Image: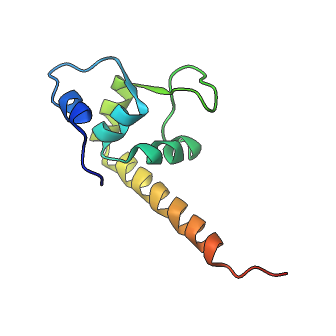
Amino acid sequence: MNAINDHIKAFLNLHTHPARFTKEQAAAYLGFEPEQIAILIQKSLLKPLGRPAPNGEKYFAKVDLENFKQDKDWLSKATLAVALHWQERNARKSKPKMN
């Protein structure tokens, strides 16, 4: 995991969090990297609020994130989904190309 920047560290240390989190805040809160949030969305393990555009800013409900953070089964599924994503992606890269 990358070093947590000062902004995220300050956010995590708040006594009261906002009702919705950005992708970066959600990632830090759950213990994932920000780029892994897209994988969790793709695998239907995390759902952003509303109907954001594919390239738009995504927000996540604090109440959902709190539940996920306490759910060992969800954390296990999410961790496995990220690992499998990178395994599959790396396997595709290492396949020899046929001309």
* In the foreground, 71 or 8: 8
Q: Horizontal placement of 14 versus 79: left or right?
A: left
Q: Horizontal placement of 54 versus 63: left or right?
A: right
Q: Quadrant location of residue 15?
A: top left
Colour scheme in the image? rainbow
**Is 7 situated above or below 44?**
above
Quadrant occupied by the N terminus: bottom left
How many marks do you count on the picture? 0
Q: Horizontal placement of 2 versus 81: left or right?
A: left
The image position of residue 97, as x and y in percent, is: 75, 79
Please identify the residue farthest to the right as the structure is shown: 99
**Is 91 situated above or below 69?**
below
**Is 52 situated above or below 78?**
above
The image position of residue 18, as x and y in percent, is: 30, 17
**Is 97 situated above or below 22?**
below
* In the foreground, 45 or 5: 5
Q: Horizontal placement of 46 versus 5: left or right?
A: right
Quadrant occupied by the C terminus: bottom right
Q: Residue at x 37, y 25 (%)?
A: 21
Q: Residue at x 53, y 40 (%)?
A: 41
The image position of residue 70, as x and y in percent, is: 27, 39
The image position of residue 3, as x and y in percent, is: 24, 49
Q: Residue at x 81, y 81 (%)?
A: 98
